Amino acid sequence: MTESPQAPATDAGDGDHALALAAAAGDTAAFEALYRRHSARVHGVVLRLAGWQRARAEDLVQEAFLRAWQALPGWRGDAAFGTWLHRLAVNVALMDLRARRVRPALDGDDAAALDALPAAGSPGHGGSLAIDLARAVATLPPRARAVLVLHDIEGWTHGEIGAALDMATGSSKSQLHRARGLLRARLGDTA
């Protein structure tokens, strides 16, 4: 008896399912296509979780895609490929946070890049609040930042966050409350 292929519902009509199956069979061109499709989104969440440390985020993105390549032969297709990859990348970033357990400082270049961004009220820059928010999020303690990013940006539940960060659901809620309070204090009148 042969196994039937996964239901096409996991494809989501984006072609990722077929590319993932080809990549799982060793097709590097298919994996490159998946990388091109998903690297920006993966980089975005990893960058936020890494506190805007660009060099660290780039390393973590590479690690996530390396792990995806290694794990693809075991991918069952139960979830859409993009969902699976995104979750894998977040887990790579969270493992890095757990391993560091210290508050990372911005790299010299990254701190200079953040400082060079226009401040609130700069003429001709409509995104200054977003820049101020990015700066404020980057300064949060790592666990509070991780909970905030995962809950408010990525849409994870407190139960999922607690499981991923090895904390109780109540601790996730507490960290989110703490992160939001710190953000309000740091943003001051612009919030």
Image: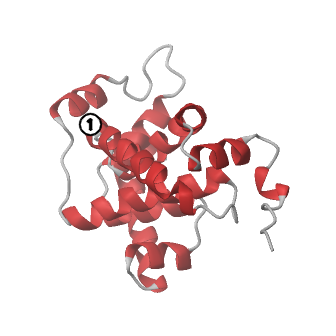
Residue at the image point whose x is 45% and y is 40% from the top: 43
On the picture, is 152 further left or further right than 118? right
Residue that label 1 marks: 55
Image check: 53 left or right of 128? left
Residue 139 position, x and y percent, is 29, 50
Q: Is residue 145 visible?
A: no
Looking at the image, which residue is at 43% across and 62% down? 91
x then y, percent, for residue 120: 42, 29
Please state the total of marks drawn on the protein image.
1
| Label 1 crowd (10 A; few <14 / some 14-19 / many >=20) | some
In the image, 36: left or right of 142?
Answer: right
Res. 28 in view:
yes
Please state the horizontal and vertical placement of residue 27, each as a whole percent of the image: 57, 38
Q: Nearer the viewer, residue 119 or 58?
A: 58
- The foreground one among 80 and 190 is 80
Q: In the figure, 28 relative to 169: above or below?
A: above
Q: Amino acid at mark 1?
A: Ala
The quadrant holding residue 15 is top right
- State the residue in front, 142 or 177: 142
Residue at x 54% of width, y 44% of height: 26
Question: Quarter of the image containing the N terminus?
Answer: bottom right
For label 1, the SS is helix
Which residue appears farthest toward the front when viewing the image? Answer: 1
Position of 35 compared to 104: left or right? right
Q: Position of residue 5 (x, y in %)?
A: 79, 60
